[in-house]
Image (cartoon, rainbow, N blue to C red):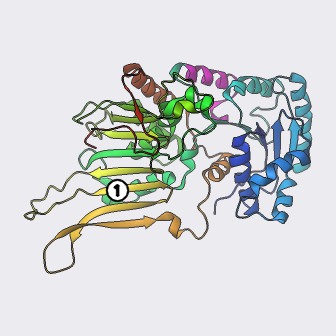
Amino acid sequence: MFECNEPCLFTIFGSTGDLSYKKIFPALFHLHASHRLPKCFFIIAIGRKKYLKNSFLEQLKPFIAKNELFTEEKWISFSHIIDYFQLDFNNEIDYLHFYDYINELDAAYKTLGNRIFYFAVSPNFFEIISLNLNNYNLISSNNGFHRVVFEKPFGKDLKTAQKFNKVLQTYFSENQIYRIDHYLGKEMIRNILVLRFTNRLFEEIWCKNGIEKVHIKILETIGIENRGEYYDNTGALRDMVQNHLLQMLALVAMDPPAKFDTNSIKDKKVNVLKHLKLYEGNLISPNIILGQYDNYKETPGVRKDSLTETYAFVPCEIDSARWRGVPFILETGKSLDQKKAEIEIYFKPSSSNYLLEHQEIKQNKLVIRIQPSEGINLEMNAKKPGIEFDIDTVNMEYCHSCNSLSRSSDAYEKLIVDLINGDSTRFTRWDEIEFAWSFIDQLTDKYSLNKDNLKLYKSNSRGPKNDANF
């Protein structure tokens, strides 16, 4: 059972936003209700709205009530470790009052000076909050641990990401900064390294000698809903490929580290991203495919002449001895006909001469299912039952969610536990982000968006027509 060991004060800037209501507070409640938070722990909900504590809790309760562990007794217990503090991000006097307040709480709840500041706000506020935390000595490295947590987006290209990182490193050391990519907290993403490095049957073939191609996909049936203004300035490449898909690729393709500690794993992931380039092999249609679903421009906040892509199909490869020549296909899209996130690994066809006349021998395929059903499926060839010597494809399947006695822990629950315990393995280091943006910039420079290469597709379809032999 995972649990938090360190006492601390957990401060959430932007506590009245969707991220806090829908993700952060429900995760904290579940950890509290299952007795996995430290005994000495307190949550400070920061917001600009004029709420009293009870008013804030009234707004929060409907979101917590959806949790399967919810009872009135547990809700009352959880509400005892929450307080609301009104703070104008631009008002320095408010930070002075906050300094006195947080020191009082530290003494009252015996949190030993340990503090976490979660930035669940627009990136526009990152710098002003960071500046004032620093100016009013709310964060340091002298008295307990002090950590800051940032949600994506980390910029919109390499240049803005570098500028953003320079601001952060002005006020915080790298070991204080935790950059969240919530996909890294998902159960089957965490399982990739276990699958790869604890099973001897994959050890020699997990490279260009054994693997023909890899398809990594995150497909969604929903459109952009009420995120029109944000999404129209972002698009599928920046919203999904730059972070979630490239992180999945790095875990699949990384070389075995000498040690399985945080920095050794991240060093190997960075080495993958550093050698990533657009695929130049023999796919029928090797160029990327960018698409936009047909009623996207009708969404409030979206420009009527928008060229923002809601679908991306990106063939790339890793220029390394292990992977050179193997296509890695990254695919993501909104308003499609299916919802799934999975990694498909196609092994090369059998080199044996054991081929029977008129028999189709299919190549082996390993599928790592991330959502909606978590699990692993391995396709193999075997003889069909009966007198004839016919060959069929059979599946060896592991259903992770089926084997769990309770619901699989939410990604945010795991990441919050890691955050409190100081384990940054599943958070992104700056150089991971830097090389990921470098690849995205390379891609967008080569394929600038225009009406000729942005393909329209119908909502609830499979996406734009794709002639690639994949």
The answer, for residue 101, to whether it is visible in the render is yes
The one of 353 and 239 positioned closer to us in this rendering:
239
Q: Quadrant of residue 248?
A: top left
The spot of residue 294 in percent (x, y) is 47, 35
Q: Which residues are magenta?
A: 160-177
Work out whether 280 lies above or below 380: above
The spot of residue 299 in percent (x, y) is 59, 33
Q: Please state which amino acid type lies under the numbered disc 1.
A: Leu
Would residue 6 be counted in the magenta stretch?
no
The one of 32 and 217 positioned closer to us in this rendering:
217
Image quarter in which the C terminus is found:
top left
Residue depicted at x 25% and y 50%:
210
The spot of residue 218 in percent (x, y) is 46, 45
Q: Within 10 Å of the Cα at label 1, are there few (<14), some (14-19), or many (20+) other Cα atoms? A: some
Check disc 1 and report the residue beneath it.
366
Residue depicted at x 62% and y 52%:
414
- Please identify the residue farthest to the left as the structure is shown: 357
The answer, for residue 257, to whether it is visible in the render is no
The answer to whether residue 123 is left or right of residue 257 is right
Residue depicted at x 34% and y 35%:
315
The one of 152 and 236 positioned closer to us in this rendering:
236
Image quarter in which the N terminus is found:
bottom right
Work out whether 373 lies above or below 291: below
Mark 1 residue element = strand
The spot of residue 91 in percent (x, y) is 86, 23
Q: Main secondary structure of the magenta part?
A: helix
The answer to whether residue 367 is left or right of residue 361 is right
- Please identify the residue farthest to the bottom as the structure is shown: 387
